[in-house]
Amino acid sequence: MTKVLVDIQNISVGYDENIVLRDVSLKIYEQDFLGIVGPNGGGKTTLVKSILGLLKPVSGCIVFPDKNVKSRIGYMPQINLIDRKFPILVSEVIESGLMAAKNKSKSEKKEKVRAIIREMNIENISGKAIGELSGGQMQRVLLARAVVNDPKLLILDEPSSYVDKQFESHFYQLLQEINKEAAIVLVSHDIETIRSNTKNIAYVEETLDYKTLIV
């Protein structure tokens, strides 16, 4: 039987008195590739923040049957949430994805960062400050940070917004490889991207409608 990584049970989530998600239930399985679509303001990012523990449900609960999964979530935020003026280098951004890896030594972390930099083909920008990067370069760095700790669950919020066309096909090839070892939740406004790359779809507009694409 396929293992459940995240069990979302009848959650309602809001900001102050405004309920954004109402009575939402969803299971995310091992090696799932779930696409989340819906209108702006419909609750897609609110659902993601709830899974990450950044927002507490007003009612219902989110259960991680395997407690280790909670510390093995990789997250790639929307690029417009990143402060480009913050004085940090690309390599340091990626290494910050290993903060929860208490079992790795400093040298192991450095080697892991070097390996993911090679995989993402960003050696030429690893020593740059994030303020010097293009949108496409920044997306590669954010993906590298999200996967550097070998997550069991990878959550990507509008990841292709700034991916350059040259990298886009490689980006989704990388996700297919990552999906062999990790479940992926991909939030996007682009329904064609979701249909082409995911196994299941959740349509979120206050409530949730779930559809499987893989029979």
Image (cartoon, rainbow, N blue to C red):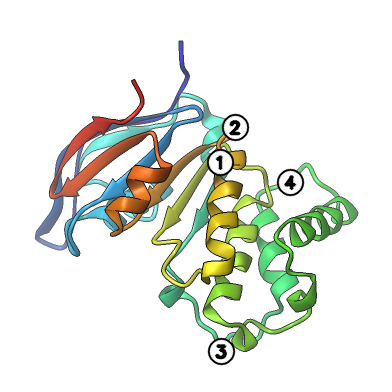
Badge number at residue 180: 2
Disc number lying in front (4 or 1): 1
What residue did someone put label 3 on? 85
N-term-proximal mark, 3 vs 1:
3
x 17%, y 59%: residue: 39
Q: Are marks 3 and 1 in contact (CB under 8 Å)?
A: no
Give the amino acid at mark 1: Gln
Identity of the amino acid at label 3?
A: Lys
Q: Please say if the residues under marks 2 and 1 sit with CB atoms less than 8 Å apart.
A: yes
Of callouts 2 and 4, which one flags the residue occurring earlier in the amino acid sequence? 4
Whether residue 198 is visible to the viewer of this picture, yes or no, is yes
Q: Badge 4: few (under 14), some or many (20 or more) residues near its Cα, within 10 Å?
A: few
Residue linked to disc 4: 102
For marks 3 and 4, the one nearer the N-term is: 3
* Residue 167 image point, x, y percent: 58, 64
- Residue 101 as seen in the image, left or right of residue 46: right
Q: Secondary structure at mark 4?
A: loop
Tell me how far mark 3 sits from mark 4, CA to CA.
Answer: 29 Å
Helix, strand or loop under label 3: loop
Inter-mark Cα distance, 2 to 3: 36 Å
Secondary element at tag 1: helix
- The amino acid marked with disc number 4 is Lys
Which numbered marker is on residue 176?
1
Mark 1 nearby-residue class (10 Å; few <14, some 14–19, many ≥20):
some
Q: Residues within 10 Å of mark 2 (few under 14, many from 20)?
A: few
Residue at 71% across, 79% down: 89
Q: Earlier in the sequence, mark 4 or mark 1?
A: 4
